[in-house]
Image (spheres, rainbow, N blue to C red):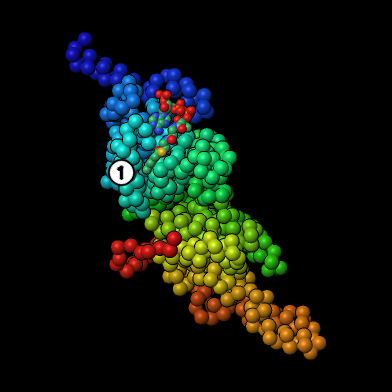
Amino acid sequence: MSKQTEKIKALVEKRELARLGGGQKTIDKQHERGKYTARERIEMLVDKGSFEEYDMFKLHRCHNFGMEKKQYLGDGVVAGSATIDGRLVYLYAQDFTVNGGSLSETMAQKICKVMDMAMTNGAPVICMNDSGGARIQEGISALAGYGEIFERNILASGVIPQISSILGPCAGGAVYSPALTDFIIMKEQTSYMFLTGPKVVKTVTGEDIDAEHLGGASVHASKSGVTSFTAKTEEEAMELIKQLLSYIPSNNREEAPRVECTDPIDRKEDLLNEIIPDDPNQAYDMYKVIQAVTDNGEFFEVQPKFAKNIITGFARFNGQSVGIVANQPSAYAGVLDTNASRKGARFVRFCDAFNIPIVSLVDVPGFLPGTGQEYNAVILHGAQLLYAYGEATVPKITITLRKSYGGSHIVMGCKQLRSDLNFAWPSAEIAVMGASGAVAVLCGREAKEVKEQGGDVKQFLAEKEEEYSEKFANPYQAAQFGYIDDVIEPRNTRFRICRGLAQLAHKKQDLPAKKHGCMPM
Ligand code: HXC
């Protein structure tokens, strides 16, 4: 065997050893926990044979607490580039088989390297989290490593899409990297995210709670809104990432990939002409409207379990990717509250940062009143949504289906927030407030007089409400002022959106020069 051949053989063996991570025993343990290994996860996600690994031979440099004996090629993270559906991505997967995937200084360097490459080459970065947090034996070096990663997350925000999948523990300050990314996917049952674990919670607050109820996938999907998606299996998590990528561009200088559209753009949906109930207080399902207007009825929902009174997600019109924001009359009457506002604001900002037009479907009775909301800063959260819409320079099309009252009318993409095309259905009610609330304010004194004179107050109020509704519960006052560009037949909605998007394909709009705005938070 020549020296060269021997060296190549040694390389192959070294690679094989590196691919074993923490060794077969720890791999078996990982499988017993119901989890895949870092490399298996990457294989599952990327195009076959496309993964190119970097820093496979990197080693940590720590000598504290016997760490020289816990040395594994590549340390606790597998990092590199690959393609997904032929598109370049950079990715890293924490390897729990190596010292619990705990983050060392060298691991941080590996992660930062792929993040830098992603930025330079304008490609999304995807991380797979499964880690015991900062490597305790390294002390400040591990913390500094996190700092380096967080700074890159911040600088990459709005430049390249960043996606985090949480497939195991993610605790302490480590949660801030995923929190700084655009989308989080949590695997049910085996993953959790929290700043302080159950033991610390018990010591500090006396609260008895397990990891799943403190920071499991279902908690963050429905209560905190931290996660964008949940997945029953790791396979499903990877499928969600692929689907998500198909709707978004690789960076902020590109458009989202366009797909061929077989669904006629002028498809009329008679169902929409019937969907608004005669009773203004009766609900209907906004998902049916979304399904009726999008290409092939497809909709990829973001945060489906959180703040269900607002719906956010991606769809396509004539093959073009679009962000949909819609009030949901069948969840709390579609009212806006703190959670709905921040959910909507986050989504609108992502779409705007990545050149994805926004279509808003409006049926909103207003903001939810009460101390619960006011004490939780509904003023600021509502302003976030307002700010996001007003700041967004991507094409914006707003369709008002029914109610659009007061502040919520303005917030949900009205004309004055530089919305491009505002259409209303004939059932639209665009007014300062609903009839009963308005009459209570305007006719209180008269109602008192009617009562004093022994008149029928109920009938008086009903007549006044009728008068108010006739004047304001329609789209024509707004259309008269040009605040609605056209009143359209509901069944033509898909066509009007598709045609509108085509008109707006080359839209250019700027913001005043500034370092950055001061978004209310
Ligand atoms: C070094 C760690 C580690 C850590 C786990 N390991 N976490 N080594 N630093 N942070 C090692 C274990 O010693 C063990 O090594 C191996 O990984 C597997 O861990 P186990 O405990 O056997 O696994 P499991 O029972 O599944 O428990 C997983 C765990 C637990 C829940 C994650 O390991 C744990 O509680 N770890 C500590 C979590 C933590 O408090 N981290 C610091 C958070 S604060 P051996 O060699 O025995 O197999 C933080 C600050 C970040 O991260 C700040 C950023 C700004």
Q: Residue at x 52, y 40 (%)?
A: 203
| Image coords of residue 287 (percent x, y) | 60, 55
Residue tagged by mark 1? 148
> Quadrant location of the C terminus?
bottom left
Residue 341 in sight: yes
Q: In the picture provided, is 250 more to the left or to the right than 381? A: left
Query: In this view, which residue lies farthest toward the left?
Result: 3
Q: Indicate the quadrant where residue 64 lies.
A: top left
Residue type highlighted by circle 1: Glu
Residue 367 higher or lower than 124, as above or below: below
Q: In the rendered view, would you say 398 is above or below 452?
A: above
Residue 332 position in % (x across, y down) = 64, 60
Tell me: residue 320, above or below residue 467.
above
Residue at image x 51%, y 63%? Answer: 377
Quadrant holding ligand 1? top left
Q: Residue at x 75, y 83 (%)?
A: 460
Instruction: Quadrant for the N terminus, please.
Output: top left
Which residue is nearer to you in this view: 401 or 443?
443
* Identity of the residue furthest to the bottom in this view: 453
Picture residue at 52% right of the left edge, 28% below the top:
34
- Per the image, label 1 sits on a secondary structure element best described as helix
Q: Position of residue 495 (x, y in %)?
A: 53, 62
